[in-house]
């Protein structure tokens, strides 16, 4: 065997320096990209919450037009998804496609505040990721319509 053949057969693995360089490059990429991706997840949840809150607000407005004001303290599901006993034939629901629309992306049910603080008749509210009134960013309240 000549010397060139012997060298090529001996060198079939990475050196420790090459492995360290690759790990450092992957670490830098992860440090730069990960925060941006995590921020996008929060934005997507907030956008979904706003869309669902708009759908719930439209459903509540339609219910009010059909049947009048919902009972005080009633859950959204009790009058949007099933017919209350006191509305007679005016109820034309269900007013939403499915029960999943009654929850925000963080798993909490939307709240209906009557009379509304932002709007005259009512507000549909999600308290955001922290589930507490107030906050900023992903923790900010969503109030519709």
Image: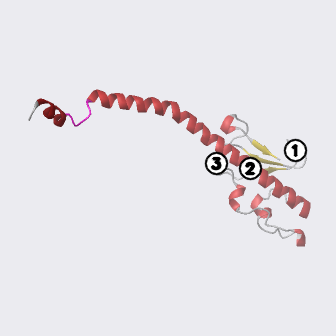
Count numbered badges in the picture. Answer: 3
Q: Which residues are magenta?
A: 11-15
Return the mark for residue 51.
2
**Element assignment for label 1:** loop
Residue tagged 1: 119
| Quadrant hosting residue 92 | bottom right
How crowded pointer 2 is (Cα within 10 Å; few <14, some 14-19, many 20+) is rated as some
Magenta: main secondary structure: loop
In this picture, residue 110 sits left or right of residue 105: right
* Residue 29 place in picture, x, y as percent: 47, 32
* 12 magenta-colored: yes
- Residue beneath the point at 68% across and 58% down: 100
Q: Going from the N terminus, do you reach mark 3 or mark 2 first?
A: 2
How crowded pointer 3 is (Cα within 10 Å; few <14, some 14-19, many 20+) is rated as some
Q: Going from the N terminus, do you reach mark 1 or mark 2 first?
A: 2
Relative depth, front residue between 47 and 10? 10
Q: CA distance from mark 3 to mark 2?
A: 14 Å
């Amino acid at each position: 065997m000549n010397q060139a053949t012997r060298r090529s057969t001996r060198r079939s693995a990475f050196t420790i320096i090459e492995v360290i360089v690759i790990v450092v490059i992957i670490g830098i990429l992860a440090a730069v990209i990960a925060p941006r991706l995590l921020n996008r997840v929060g934005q997507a949840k907030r956008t979904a919450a706003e869309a669902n809150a708009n759908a719930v607000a439209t459903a509540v407005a339609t219910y009010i037009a059909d049947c009048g004001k919902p009972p005080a303290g009633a859950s959204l599901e009790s009058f949007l998804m099933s017919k209350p006993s006191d509305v007679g034939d005016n109820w034309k629901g269900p007013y939403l496609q499915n029960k999943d629309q009654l929850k925000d992306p963080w798993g909490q049910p939307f709240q209906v505040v009557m009379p509304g603080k932002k709007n005259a008749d009512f507000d549909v509210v999600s308290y955001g990721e922290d589930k507490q009134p107030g906050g900023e960013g992903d923790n900010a309240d969503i109030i519709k319509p």
